[in-house]
Amino acid sequence: MLESIALTDLAEKVGYRLHQQQAIVSTAESCTGGLLASTIIEVAGSSQWFDRGFITYSNQAKIDELGVKVISLQHYGAVSEKVAEEMALGVLYTLRQQPHYLEDITCYAISTTGVAGPSGGTAEKPVGMVCFSFVKKDSQGIRTLKTSTQYFNGSRSAIRQQAVKFALWTLLELIEE
């Protein structure tokens, strides 16, 4: 089923569920370069449930914008579940600093970091490897719901699209739990 569903249809389903819960989502993207946020805002009414997106392509951007730790980048590398988790957590910590921050709103954050290719892959981190993290802030606090590493095939564009589809599908599953 995942292969046959269009990205915008999937984003619409996510939006419907978020709107039902009066929740919002924000993104932190590296290898998908804003495609996840762009797919989300293709849905009419997404301003009701999408807050913001960070594109942190460079390591320095991850540090500056999201508070990713230098030691994590050095030890695990930018393409790692650890860095993906720090990116997603960084989104929610950034939101907490905003003057409009509302304690009673449930917030989800998704992050993507990987090797979209066609170059840049290694034996340990091949082209198509993408790490994801999904975190949530609600009345119970901030917690990581899931981290995952997936391997996709195809062109740079195909890898990025598959990563977005996986991110949206996984978020939908987590929202429905």
Image (tube, grey):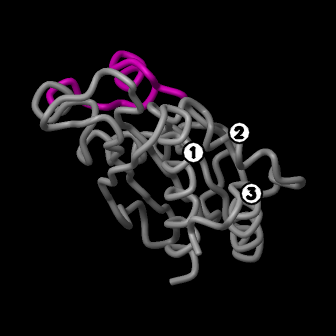
Residue projecting furthest to the bottom:
177
Horizontal side, residue 159 vs residue 25: left or right: left
Mark with earlier residue (2, 1):
2
Q: Give the label, 2 or 3, closer to the camera.
A: 2
Q: Amino acid at mark 2?
A: Ser
The magenta stretch spans which residues? 55-71
Q: Give the label, 1 or 3, closer to the camera.
A: 1
Mark with earlier residue (2, 3):
2
Residue 38 tag number: 2
Decide: is 133 above or below 177: above
Residue 70: in magenta span? yes
Mark with earlier residue (1, 3):
3
Q: Give the label, 2 or 1, closer to the camera.
A: 1
Residue 54: in magenta span? no
Which residue appears at 50% of the width and 58% of the height? Answer: 166
Residue 11 horizontal/vertical position (percent): 71, 59
Q: Amino acid at mark 3?
A: Trp
To which residue does mark 1 refer?
Answer: 161
Residue neighbourhood size for the residue with mark 2, other residues' Cα within 10 Å, grouped as few (<14), some (14–19), many (≥20): few
177 vs 169, nearest the viewer = 169
Residue neighbourhood size for the residue with mark 1, other residues' Cα within 10 Å, grouped as few (<14), some (14–19), many (≥20): some
Residue 49 tag number: 3
Residue 162 horizontal/vertical position (percent): 52, 50
